[in-house]
Amino acid sequence: MDWQRLDKFLWCARFASQREACSRLAEAGLVRINGLRTDKAHARVRVDDVLTVPLAAGVCVIRVRVLPERRGPASEAHTLYELLPAP
């Protein structure tokens, strides 16, 4: 597949410890994909998409590099995306 659900990508990339928390984050309309706000946990994420994700420490802007097949260790999760400077 050339895409992955937003909540699954955020969970595999370890932005939250539970997939349900990633779903709630997306459904609250707080995540942007390529600058467009989404309120769907099932929104499609593709390689080279830019995600804007709010975190407790601030806003995180990333470019998707790889779509994971599974949730691995944190060291592996950091290879899934490239951190971009916040706007």
Image: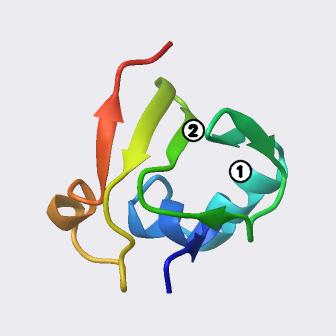
Please count the marks in the image: 2
Give x and y (percent) for residue 16: 50, 57
Q: Which mark is residue 9?
A: none
Secondary structure, mark 1, is helix
Work out which residue is located at the far left of the displayed protein and give it.
Answer: 75
Q: Residue at the location (61% across, 39% down)?
A: 34
Give x and y (percent) for residue 36: 74, 37
> In the rendered view, how is the structure colored?
rainbow
Q: Amino acid at mark 1?
A: Leu
Q: Residue at the location (51% across, 60% down)?
A: 10
Q: Is residue 9 left or right of residue 5?
A: left
Give the mark toward the camera: 1 or 2: 2
Q: Residue at the location (71% across, 50% down)?
A: 25
Secondary structure, mark 2, is strand
List the residue tagged with mark 2.
53
Q: Nearer the viewer, residue 59 or 82?
A: 82
Give x and y (percent) for residue 35: 66, 32
**Callouts 1 and 2 close, C-beta under 8 Å:** yes
List the residue tagged with mark 1.
25
Q: Amino acid at mark 2?
A: Val
Q: Is residue 6 above or below residue 25?
A: below
- Circle 2 packing at 10 Å, graded few (<14), some (14-19), many (20+), is some
Whole-angstrom CA distance, mark 1 to mark 2, is 9 Å
Give x and y (percent) for residue 17: 48, 63
- Circle 1 packing at 10 Å, graded few (<14), some (14-19), many (20+), is many
Q: Is residue 32 above or below residue 76?
A: above
- Residue 75: which quarter of the image? bottom left
Q: Is residue 28 left or right of residue 36?
A: right
Q: Is residue 32 left or right of residue 84?
A: right
Q: Is residue 78 above or below residue 29?
A: below
Q: Nearer the viewer, residue 21 or 85?
A: 85
Q: Is residue 56 above or below residue 4?
A: above
